[in-house]
């Protein structure tokens, strides 16, 4: 009980800890006053518990494994045949959070390569109508498993989608969208008092797959634990930056890759819980070695063990309030002469042909692809915990820079959030060139590399949302002076 109260103190609970500290420091107290102080202290401790439990949390989930199989799996251009079965189900999961002031947030995770604007806007419109949630309060993260069904039109350049194939994909995507909404509905309906705590571990299986002279990695495993008042673990949210590409193009079985195995392992260890994997800035991060189901199981266990170790240790309490922010900027592409696409259209490379067709059609419609919209979101819980949600396949440089720029915050930096339109290279990766900077744009149906401004434009948006979610605490600081 005492430890609990002191923990709230460290978490920066306003007003209460000061009063409590004064009481516990009293040395000579008359008997009657002593009883009064005992009651008052107990009341304060109970208030402390109430305050610590000022968050309510709800959990929801729905299977998104396609009902009708086989399906076309997304992620590898080399695949020429559809799925042949599954290893385990893939899921849409939702974590609803509400603070004592009634502010809400819903974090949605999905075992897919990447969601699209079409899906996120459908989900947000429906959740706005049903629950009054605004866009800024709804967060999406795709695990980027390369063993889940195609989400149209992501990487549509990779496949030859006949009308019949496309009909199946569109229907699967419609059902998946409904399941995502179902998971979010369940989470909101499930809101109940909960205690949140946080910690940080490490896992070392991700390497920088670009293998250049400068090869940064981010081995952090931030963990958020959600428990019921009786101590039962209801949810575990954890983050790691590594491509879900342990299983390669030869795999035709639906599964969540290492992240899917990690979640299963944690749900087995905490049977009342739902595990949420939040993909990090993993664009240039691969598991190594890779290629077999055994590798995926091994990394899943390694990651789950890192999470369990954090949960077995001294975790710090998380309190409200919740603050959510959303902004959208635009990322500009370097100009590409029309002649390049005319040549590619009649060239031998089928992927460049398809990309050129998209680019010329857009140009002739009067909408040449010169930039893309880029949503950025942030969510803060209490004074010193923030989750940053970056869209697209973000290289690890972004997570490392965010952590450097906000050293006072406990940060969870997620990539693959909202929509996943293409890779998001840093200025360094752009200068180096290669797949994440340039070639991947062919498969994503984009004209070519971004301009050099890409990193600073993204950071402008990051600063904007971080400013909003940190505002109340800055104001408080000023008043205190
Ligand atoms: Zn990728």
Image (cartoon, helix red, strand yellow):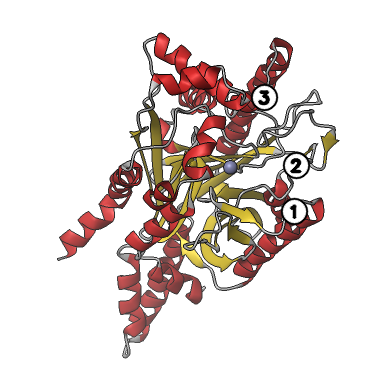
Which residue is at the front of the view, 361 or 101?
361
Which of disc 3 and disc 2 is earlier in sequence? 3
Which of disc 1 and disc 3 is earlier in sequence? 3
Which residue is at the front of the view, 1 or 74?
74
The residue labelled by disc 2 is 255
- Residue at left offset 21%, top offset 55%: 475
CB under 8 Å between callouts 2 and 1? yes
The residue labelled by disc 1 is 296
In which of the image's four quarters is ligand 1 placed? top right
Instruction: For residue 420, say whether it is visible.
Output: no
Q: Is residue 182 above or below residue 219?
A: above
The residue labelled by disc 3 is 159
Rate crowding at label 3 as few (under 14), some (14 to 19) or many (20 or more) other CA atoms within 10 Å: many
Q: Is residue 308 left or right of residue 401?
A: right
- Residue at left offset 58%, top offset 34%: 184
Look at the numbered disc 1 and give the secondary structure of its residue: helix
Q: Is residue 283 left or right of residue 171?
A: left
Instruction: For residue 307, say whether it is visible.
Output: yes
Residue 112 horizontal/vertical position (percent): 64, 36
């Amino acid at each position: 009980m005492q430890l609990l109260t002191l923990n709230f103190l460290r978490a920066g609970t306003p007003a209460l800890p000061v009063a409590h500290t004064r009481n516990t420091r009293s040395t000579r107290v008359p008997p009657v006053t002593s009883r009064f102080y005992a009651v008052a202290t107990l009341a304060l401790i109970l208030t402390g518990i109430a305050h610590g439990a000022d968050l309510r949390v709800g959990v929801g989930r729905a299977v998104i494994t396609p009902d009708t199989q086989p399906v076309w799996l997304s992620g590898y251009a080399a695949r020429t045949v559809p799925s042949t079965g599954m290893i385990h189900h893939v899921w849409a999961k939702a974590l609803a959070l509400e603070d004592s002031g009634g502010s809400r947030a819903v974090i949605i995770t999905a075992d897919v390569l990447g969601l699209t604007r079409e899906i996120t806007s459908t989900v947000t419109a429906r959740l706005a109508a049903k629950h009054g949630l605004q866009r800024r309060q709804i967060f999406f993260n795709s695990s980027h498993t390369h063993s889940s069904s195609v989400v149209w039109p992501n990487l549509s350049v990779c496949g030859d989608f006949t009308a019949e194939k496309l009909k199946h994909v569109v229907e699967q995507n419609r059902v998946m969208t409904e399941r995502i909404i179902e998971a979010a509905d369940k989470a909101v309906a499930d809101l109940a008092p909960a205690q949140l705590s946080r910690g940080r571990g490490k896992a070392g299986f991700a390497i920088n797959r670009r293998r250049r002279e400068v090869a940064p990695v981010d081995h952090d495993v931030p963990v958020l634990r959600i428990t019921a008042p009786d101590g039962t673990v209801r949810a575990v949210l954890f983050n790691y930056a590594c491509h879900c590409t342990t299983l390669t193009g030869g795999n035709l079985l639906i599964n969540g890759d290492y992240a899917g195995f990690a979640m299963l392992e944690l749900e087995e260890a905490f049977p009342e819980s739902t595990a949420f994997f939040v993909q990090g800035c993993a664009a240039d991060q691969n598991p190594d070695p890779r290629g077999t189901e055994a590798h995926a199981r091994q990394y899943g266990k390694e990651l789950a063990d890192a999470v369990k170790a954090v949960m077995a240790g001294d975790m710090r309490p998380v309190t409200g309030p919740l603050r959510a922010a959303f902004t959208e900027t635009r990322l500009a592409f370097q100009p590409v002469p029309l002649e390049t696409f005319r040549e590619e259209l009649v060239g031998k490379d089928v992927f460049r042909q398809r990309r050129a067709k998209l680019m010329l059609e857009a140009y002739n419609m009067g909408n040449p692809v010169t930039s893309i919209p880029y949503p950025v979101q942030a969510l803060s819980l209490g004074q010193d915990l923030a989750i940053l949600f970056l869209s697209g396949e973000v290289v690890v440089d972004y997570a490392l820079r965010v952590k450097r720029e906000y050293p006072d915050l406990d940060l969870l930096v997620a990539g693959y959030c909202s929509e996943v339109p293409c890779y998001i290279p840093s200025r360094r990766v752009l200068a180096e060139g290669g797949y994440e900077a340039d070639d991947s744009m062919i498969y994503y149906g984009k004209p070519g590399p971004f301009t050099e401004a890409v990193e600073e434009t993204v950071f402008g948006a990051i600063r904007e949302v971080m400013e909003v979610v940190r505002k109340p605490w800055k104001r408080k600081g000023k008043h205190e002076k």
